[in-house]
């Protein structure tokens, strides 16, 4: 006799989720790699290490790092205010919040910082519209991707995008390692 599933329709919903995931994530990733492999390794290396592109990486990473640090500091200040001070509506928020204690908030602070940093690195659409276009000073990597796309140089555009994706992946991997280390340290103190 077939055992009843705890979640009815799990197979169907899982299949639909995987189909949508492949459409939204895997196909664009495939096309990113497919256009990039049209370049030889030396062409790829030349494309991603041109001085203007390296400058774009630097501006993108430094501004993302700055924004993420500001985000982390403001988040910590907001958490402190929510716990320490009285203000209208605080009783409602007290029902939502389980206390802010620095050693315990450290994993969340690290996680928030690294996720904001990875998100800032991966941002493409909105920052292109507000980015400066002074070469070597205010050009960001997404703007360089856009200019390569306008020149119909898809392999160069996807190469730059692949490097940005790799940077975001490394940041998320570092986040996972830091979370693991901090969690072990905090559980060892308890």
Image: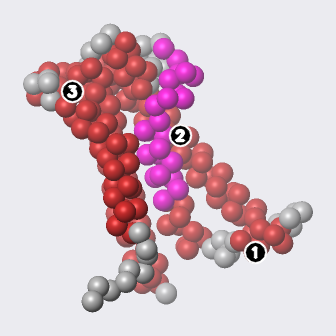
- Quarter of the image holding residue 48? top left
Task: Decide: few, some or many residues near mark 3? Use Cα within 10 Å; few <14, some 14-19, many ≥20.
Answer: some
Which residue occupies the foreground of this view, 172 or 124?
A: 124
Which residue bears the numbered disc 1? 95
What is the x, y in percent for residue 160?
30, 28
Residues at marks 3 and 1, CA–CA distance in whole angstroms: 51 Å
Q: Position of residue 73 (x, y in %)?
A: 62, 52
Lateral position of residue 51 relative to residue 68, left or right: left
Q: Position of residue 35 (x, y in %)?
A: 21, 27
Taken as a whole, is the magenta stretch helix, strand or loop? helix
Q: How is the image coloured?
A: secondary structure
Label 3 vs label 1, nearer the camera: 3
Sequence-wise, which precedes: disc 2 or disc 1?
A: 2
Rendered image: mark on residue 143: none
Residue sitting at x 47%, y 13%: 134
- 179 is higher (above) or lower (below) than 67: below
| Nearer-N-terminus badge (3/2) | 3
Label 2 residue SS = helix
Q: Is residue 49 visible?
A: no
Which residue range is magenta in the image?
111-133
Task: Answer few, some or many: residues within 10 Å of disc 1's Cα (few below 14, many 20 plus, some between 14 and 19).
Answer: few
Q: Which residue is mark 2?
A: 66
Look at mark 3 in the image and give the residue it sits on.
35
Q: Do we see residue 74 in this rendering?
A: yes
Residue 132, position in %: x, y? 52, 17
Identify the residue shown where x is 40% and y is 19%: 146
The residue lying furthest to the top in this view is 151
């Amino acid at each position: 006799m077939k055992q009843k599933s705890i979640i009815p329709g799990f197979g169907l919903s899982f299949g639909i989720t995987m189909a949508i995931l492949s459409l939204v994530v895997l196909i664009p990733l495939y096309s990113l790699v497919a256009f990039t492999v049209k370049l030889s390794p030396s062409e790829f290396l030349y494309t991603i290490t041109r001085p203007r592109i390296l400058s774009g990486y630097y501006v993108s990473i430094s501004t993302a790092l700055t924004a993420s640090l500001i985000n982390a500091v403001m988040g910590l200040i907001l958490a402190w205010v929510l716990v320490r001070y009285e203000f209208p509506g605080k009783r409602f928020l007290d029902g939502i919040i389980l206390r802010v204690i620095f050693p315990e908030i450290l994993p969340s602070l690290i996680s928030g910082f690294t996720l904001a940093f990875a998100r800032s690195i991966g941002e493409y659409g909105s920052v292109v519209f507000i980015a400066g276009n002074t070469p070597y000073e205010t050009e960001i990597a997404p703007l360089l991707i856009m200019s390569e796309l306008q020149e119909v140089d898809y392999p160069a555009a996807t190469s730059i995008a692949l490097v940005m994706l790799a940077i975001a992946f490394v940041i998320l991997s570092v986040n996972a390692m830091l979370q693991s280390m901090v969690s072990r340290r905090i559980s060892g103190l308890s």
